[in-house]
Image (spheres, grey):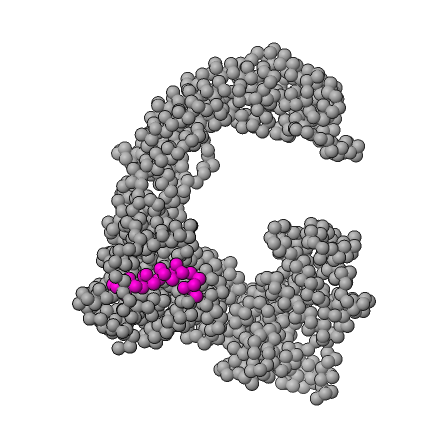
């Protein structure tokens, strides 16, 4: 029989995701009726074939192997319904033949990858995962001017995919397909092997190891009693030539000497989106849904109807999005696609022909109109599924249980959906589980976020005050599945894993800000033990800290939890002493920290704001008397940052903690003639940052300011101008008008005149004066 | 023969089928593909004629430089006897492509309706020789056929230029022609049916506002292909180079063909102004109101050559280029002048020593 090797074993080379290949494999198997089907795939995953071919299993699915210990390395073998390997397995199951994976076990694959990683000192040269299935056609991704694009160009096609589809997928004759692909890959191998041996010795060695192992497995199968001519090997076309001769077989000793890492295997649902190259993984094909259509039509013997199905599906999508396209246009699009194919001497249009025809007829020349529809038809949103409990990790089980319990299963879809949560008790239901359903969901989402599982993404709420409302964008994807599987190393359940991550983070935590953020996380994840632990960490960090800014941030976060903690059913009592302590430290170091430059003063002002808010909102916890006392000190000191002193004064004025007479005295002291501009005007800037109406209502203050400015020397005036300009820049137009009115009153001009001068255009000489100011050396201001 | 050639040389511009007569003949001779009814050569040969290649030993020059896939789509459209509509910005070689397609497929690119606001339905269908009509009544001899009707009878390709400039009722006349493939002449009680091979290549402009938008019914009868501006600097440079050399030789301009450096400068300026961004994508540039197409660049360069030949030394100087650039870019006086000034000071000034001469010349010109 043609195609039988030296040993008599039949080798069928395929492209991994190829409907044409799948169809020819099936025909070949039906013709040969083998007793064993050997497939290129991880040798230790043979037990999974049973689950892969299970009636409930819906491709795309993938075998995922991951290392048991850190650092986690993963490797994936995806299968679509049109994978020749998948169809081979199905056939074996239906016909009582044995199906087995014969490539290196995942433990060795990952072990080798690790070795390579160490040798290259970074990412291994080996491409992620499925590329390693030895698909030659995929290598053109890395080498733009590769043999593959040259082949395409010589064949008069625009890219290699077009060439491949035209010459192999559309090849209807089974024998011709197999012979062509064997000859093609043998030639390819001849061409690239020597180059690879010298340029990429690691890859070359890796492929040699795999092939030697595969030969060993084929040999073993023969020894088990299968007739060689009743064995069919389905492998990547690239390896077909190397598996023909079974003389060089890997020995036991050689196998034992290969690096290896302990791995676990699981099956996972996969998605067409992920399979398409759009999502980054090198393996896969760009249009999985298109190939599925091709496969389905081939299976029912109507392959020639693909253009009709494809283009009318696109038209339907386009219509669905509100653009009318007639059936006549679909007909013409089919004709154009067929005419394009004929121009290349092809028997049927390729995907590129169909897409171009769709753009011309359905998009009226414009790709933008149909781009979305094309993506939907090419890629599709299909996502695979597995029977419940099929080789899952404990954490996957736990997550599925939680999703079921919190009625979130319907969100397990690749289409993103919006979920609004109301964390308050739902009083219309009886059980407490139902009453706090949304709270439980929120806790779960936060835990997943902590674990780095991107299932739910929090949408910032516009209503920042409403702590009971949360918006989440929920979207399931195979990446999420991988992330879930990866977290199995952190713990058996979501809760345990989340606790582990939080504990790790607490150990690494070095600053108060980090610690307070972790307290918030612990609260959101409802992890009481970690909350206590993190507050201990925060406390111990706070003892040594004199940084008022971060103390204030931490105190603000704590105050928020104490204020609204009951919505999350969190016991906030343990935080009260901590807040008290933080607040006190903030007060005590305020004066010290206020001796800073203007840059740092901006942060200090927000810290002072925070502390003031806490003292107002939590007066039962915070030591208000101490706060006011420290503020008064700061307000009166001349050796601190004048802006902060002014700001302290403003807070005191606002809280009526300083008598009006004293304010007046302080203002006249600060703004008395002879005081340097940065002290006087800087102080005024701080003062003006709060409570503006209070300022505007005090006529005496403006009189004093007026007198002060009048008394300034020319040079000093220019310096003062900088501060004053900055102070007034944040005033609203209305407030500015009020000031101009006040000043008008002071200067005895009529208010309208004053406003006119202030808001009118600059006169020439005034403009010149301002221009001169541009040359003014502001020094260290 | 020699007199015929002399006569040909007197024409300002030759139609594509005459200009590339040798290439077309070579292609026809070497053609091995199946030739569709009414066509002069196989679709593959048409493709070679437009995209360039070899026919036996004859070199076929590329007529349309850029995306060959677009040409494939155009040819495939005409194979399916569908009408083809080429749309794009001004100066994206729409008419040029349509002329060359008609020349290759039909051997005659002269069946043209030139669309204007004044084009009437008679130009699309048929009209009468009124003297004969009055003398003898409606007779076949008195019938004046439009280019489209003649192409139908002959099974050839008619061209419709600037279709969106015609009033919509004139455009509507095309609808039934394209779907029925017949023109009925009720006065004579007969109708003209199109022979195999008949098709229409229309062109339309996307840039001009205020022209008549095509109806959905008419659009539906065309396969629409959008011709883009050249995708990269090299493509545009080679287009400009080829066309400038061709035009220079046909107009017998006495100036030397501009150096590559001058071409590069002009194409760079045009691309930057068109895309609103410097080539290195680091700086934003304001775009002028007018069209900055490849065709403008070609005519600018030939203009400058004419200037140099007639009033200068015959060598293209920076001054000649600057005058051409000024004319091509500053169309809407005030605004474009500012745009151009800004470009000169913000972009061109920083381009280094090679550009200094041109910069000063442009600066002077724009004062």
- Give the vertical position of A546 relative to A314 (above or below): above
Residue A310 in sight here: no
Q: Which residue is painted at 75% across and 75% down in the image?
A: B252
Q: Which residues are magenta?
A: A195-217
Q: Is residue B332 magenta?
A: no
Q: Which residue is painted at 37% across and 32% down in the image?
A: A506
Main SS, magenta residues: helix
Image location (x, y in percent) of residue A54: 24, 58
Q: Is residue B159 left or right of residue A76?
A: right
Image location (x, y in percent) of residue A337: 46, 70
Q: Which image quadrant for residue A692? A: top right
Residue closest to the eye, B62 or A706 = B62
Q: Is residue A517 left or right of residue B145?
A: left
Q: Is residue A576 left or right of residue B263?
A: left
Residue closest to the eye, A743 or A576 = A576
- Give the vertical position of A260 relative to B253 (above or below): above
Image location (x, y in percent) of residue A652: 55, 17
Residue A144 in sight here: yes
């Amino acid at each position: 029989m043609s195609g039988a090797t030296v040993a008599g074993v039949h080798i069928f080379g395929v492209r991994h995701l190829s409907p044409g290949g799948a169809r020819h494999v099936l025909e070949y198997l039906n013709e040969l009726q083998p007793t064993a089907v050997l497939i290129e795939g991880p040798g230790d995953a043979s037990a999974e074939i049973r689950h892969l071919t299970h009636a409930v299993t819906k491709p795309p699915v993938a075998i995922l192997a991951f290392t048991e210990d850190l650092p986690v390395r993963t490797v994936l073998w995806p299968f679509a319904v049109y994978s020749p390997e998948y169809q081979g397995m199905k056939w074996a199951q239906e016909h009582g033949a044995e199906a087995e994976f014969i490539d290196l076990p995942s433990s060795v694959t990952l072990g080798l990858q690790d070795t390579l990683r160490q040798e290259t000192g970074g990412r291994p040269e080996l491409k992620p995962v499925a590329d390693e299935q030895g698909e030659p056609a995929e290598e053109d991704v890395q080498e733009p001017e590769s043999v593959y694009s040259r082949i395409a160009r010589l064949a008069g096609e625009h890219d290699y995919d077009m060439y491949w589809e035209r010459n192999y997928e559309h090849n209807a004759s089974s024998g011709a397909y197999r012979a062509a692909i064997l000859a093609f890959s043998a030639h390819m191998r001849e061409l690239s092997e020597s180059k690879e041996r010298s340029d990429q010795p690691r890859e070359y060695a890796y492929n040699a190891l795999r092939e030697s192992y595969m030969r060993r497995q084929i040999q073993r199968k023969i020894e088990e009693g299968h007739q060689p001519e009743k064995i069919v090997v389905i492998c990547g076309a690239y390896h077909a030539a190397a598996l023909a001769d079974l003389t060089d077989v890997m020995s036991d000793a050689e196998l034992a000497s290969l690096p290896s890492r302990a791995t676990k295997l699981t099956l996972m649902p996969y998605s067409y989106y992920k399979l398409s190259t759009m999502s980054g993984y090198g393996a896969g094909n760009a249009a999985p849904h298109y190939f599925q259509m091709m496969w389905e039509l081939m299976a029912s013997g109507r392959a020639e109807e693909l253009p009709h199905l494809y283009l009318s599906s696109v038209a339907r999508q386009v219509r669905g999005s509100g653009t009318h396209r007639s059936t006549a246009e679909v007909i013409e699009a089919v004709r154009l696609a067929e005419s394009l194919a004929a121009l290349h001497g092809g028997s049927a249009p390729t995907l590129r022909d169909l897409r171009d025809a769709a753009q011309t007829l359905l998009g009226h020349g414009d790709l933008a109109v149909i781009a979305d529809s094309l993506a939907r038809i090419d890629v599709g949103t299909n996502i695979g599924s597995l029977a419940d409990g099929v080789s899952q990790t404990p954490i996957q089980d736990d997550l599925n249980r939680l999703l079921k319990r919190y009625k979130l299963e319907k969100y397990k879809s690749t289409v993103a959906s919006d979920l609004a949560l109301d964390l308050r008790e739902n009083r219309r239901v009886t059980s407490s589980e139902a009453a706090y359903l949304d709270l439980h969901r929120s806790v779960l989402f936060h835990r997943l976020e902590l674990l780095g599982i991107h299932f739910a993404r929090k949408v910032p709420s516009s209503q920042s005050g409403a702590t009971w409302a949360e918006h989440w964008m929920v979207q399931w994807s195979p990446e999420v599945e991988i992330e879930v599987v990866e977290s199995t190393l952190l713990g058996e359940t979501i809760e345990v894993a989340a606790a582990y991550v939080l504990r790790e983070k607490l150990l690494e935590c070095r600053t108060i800000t980090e610690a307070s953020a972790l307290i918030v996380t612990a609260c959101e994840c409802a992890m009481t033990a970690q909350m206590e632990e993190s507050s201990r960490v925060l406390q111990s960090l706070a003892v040594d800290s004199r940084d008022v800014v971060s103390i204030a941030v931490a105190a603000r976060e704590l105050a928020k939890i104490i204020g609204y903690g009951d919505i999350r059913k969190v016991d906030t009592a343990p935080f009260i002493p901590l807040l008290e302590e933080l607040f006190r430290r903030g007060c005590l170091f305020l004066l010290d920290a206020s001796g800073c430059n203007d840059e740092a003063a901006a942060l200090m002002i927000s810290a002072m704001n925070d502390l003031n808010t806490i003292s107002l909102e939590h007066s039962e916890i915070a030591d208000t008397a101490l706060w006011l006392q420290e503020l008064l000190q700061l307000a009166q000191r001349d050796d601190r940052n004048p802006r902060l002193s002014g700001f302290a004064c403003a807070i005191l004025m606002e809280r009526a903690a300083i008598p009006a007479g004293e304010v007046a005295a302080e203002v006249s002291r600060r703004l008395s003639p002879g005081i340097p501009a940065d002290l006087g005007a800087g102080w005024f800037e701080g003062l003006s940052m709060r409570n503006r109406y209070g300022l505007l209502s005090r006529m005496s203050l403006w009189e004093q300011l007026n007198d002060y400015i009048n008394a300034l020397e020319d040079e000093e005036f220019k310096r003062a101008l900088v501060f004053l300009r900055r102070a007034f820049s944040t005033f609203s137009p209305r407030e500015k008008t009020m000031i101009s009115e006040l000043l008008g009153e002071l200067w005895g001009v009529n208010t309208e005149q004053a406003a006119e001068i202030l808001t009118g255009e600059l006169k020439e000489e005034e403009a010149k004066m301002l221009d001169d100011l541009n040359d003014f050396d502001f020094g260290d201001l | 023969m020699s007199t015929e050639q002399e006569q040909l040389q007197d024409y300002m511009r030759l139609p594509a089928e005459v200009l590339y007569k040798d290439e077309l003949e070579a292609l026809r001779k070497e053609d091995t593909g199946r030739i569709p009814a009414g066509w002069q050569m196989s679709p593959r040969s048409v493709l070679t004629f437009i995209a360039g290649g070899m026919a036996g030993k004859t070199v076929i020059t590329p007529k349309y430089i850029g995306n060959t896939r677009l040409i494939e789509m155009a040819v495939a459209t005409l194979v399916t006897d569908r009408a083809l509509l080429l749309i794009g910005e001004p100066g994206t070689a729409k008419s040029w492509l349509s002329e060359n397609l008609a020349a290759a497929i039909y051997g005659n690119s002269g069946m043209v309706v030139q669309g204007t606001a004044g084009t009437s339905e008679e130009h699309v269908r048929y009209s009468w020789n009124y003297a004969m009509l009055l003398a003898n009544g409606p007779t076949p001899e008195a019938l004046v056929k439009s280019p489209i009707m003649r192409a139908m009878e002959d099974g050839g390709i008619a061209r419709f230029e600037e279709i969106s400039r015609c009033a919509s009722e004139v455009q509507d006349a095309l609808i039934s022609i394209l779907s029925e493939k017949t023109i009925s002449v009720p006065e004579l009680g007969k109708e003209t049916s199109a022979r195999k091979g008949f098709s229409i290549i229309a062109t339309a402009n996307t840039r001009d506002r205020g022209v008549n938008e095509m109806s959905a019914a008419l659009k539906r009868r065309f396969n629409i292909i959008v011709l883009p501006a050249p995708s990269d600097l090299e493509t545009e440079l080679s287009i400009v180079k080829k066309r400038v050399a061709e035009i220079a030789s046909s107009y017998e301009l006495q100036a030397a063909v501009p150096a590559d450096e001058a071409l590069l400068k002009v194409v760079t300026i045009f691309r930057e102004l068109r895309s609103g961004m410097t080539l290195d994508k680091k700086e934003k540039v304001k775009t002028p109101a007018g069209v900055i197409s490849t065709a403008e660049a070609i005519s600018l360069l030939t203009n400058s050559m004419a200037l140099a030949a007639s009033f200068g030394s015959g060598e293209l100087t920076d001054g000649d280029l600057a005058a051409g650039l000024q004319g091509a870019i500053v169309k809407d006086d005030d605004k474009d002048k500012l745009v151009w000034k800004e470009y000169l000071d913000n972009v061109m000034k920083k381009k280094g020593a090679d550009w200094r001469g041109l910069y000063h010349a442009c600066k002077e010109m724009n004062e």
